[in-house]
Amino acid sequence: MSAKNKLSLSVQYPDARLQESITRHKVRRWVQAALLAPAELTVRFVAADEGRVLNRDYRAKDYATNVLTFAYNDGEDVAEDEPTRADIILCTDVLEKEAKEQKKTVEEHTAHLVVHGVLHAQGYDHDDDEEAAEMEQLEREILEALGYADPYA
């Protein structure tokens, strides 16, 4: 995490509500902090309607969720020097609602969700308690290094 890995990053704002406060520079900093290897990533901020369609069509869950990660070379036989490729979709409506409910700033919560999505893109998951504990600890360490509080406190 401490060494900078090569990163090709596209940040898209079809839902422009956070474009001025959650800048490309911030997103890049958060992504870079969570990278364990080179990556080609897109981070896309969407409204609830697009988030719901994506969650329904790809996960069979008919609601908008906070973050979706589409890892394109996860689990494949990938060359050692092959970068991680993924799209990370953040639903502005959901993340703003969750930030308010959790009494966090939108920036804090977005930083957490970006780190969470980047870890998913690199093969981390939380399907069982052991995996969840490992992923959450890594998120805590990354966010602390970025100057943010424990997202699970």
Image (cartoon, grey):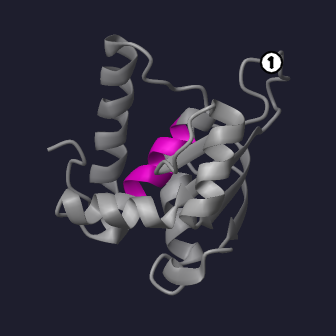
Occupied quadrant, residue 148:
bottom left
Q: Quadrant of residue 139?
A: top left
Whether 117 is among the magenta residues is yes
When the figure is inspected, residue 113 is found, relative to residue 82, above or below; the finding is: below
Q: Is residue 1 visible?
A: no
Question: Looking at the picture, does residue 94 appear above or below residue 67?
Answer: below
Identify the residue shown where x is 55% and y is 34%.
Answer: 120
Q: Which residue is mark 1?
A: 76
In the image, residue 18 above or below residue 1 = below
| Magenta stretch, residue numbers | 111-119
Image point 37% across, 46% down: which residue?
Answer: 142
Name the kind of residue labelled 1 in the image.
Answer: Glu
Q: For mark 1, does the 10 Å Cα neighbourhood hold few (<14), some (14 to 19), or many (20 or more) residues? A: few
Horizontal arrangement in the rendering, residue 32 relative to residue 80 (left or right): left
Identify the residue at horizontal 59%, vertical 51% (top origin).
Answer: 52
Q: Residue 76 appears at what percent x and percent y? A: 80, 18
Assign the magenta stretch its main secondary structure. helix
Measuring from the top left, give residue 2's x and y in whole percent.
Answer: 47, 46
Q: Secondary structure under badge 1?
A: loop
**Which residue is nearer to you in this view: 17 or 131?**
17
Instruction: Specify whether 84 is left or right of 33.
Output: right
**Residue 12 image offset from top left, x and y in percent:** 69, 70
- Residue 118 appears at what percent x and percent y? 56, 44
Residue placed most toward the observer, 27 or 54: 54
- Residue drawn 36% across and 22% down? 132
72 falls in the magenta region:
no
Which of the image's four quarters has the C terminus?
A: top left
| Residue 92 visible | yes
Q: Is residue 73 left or right of residue 19?
A: right
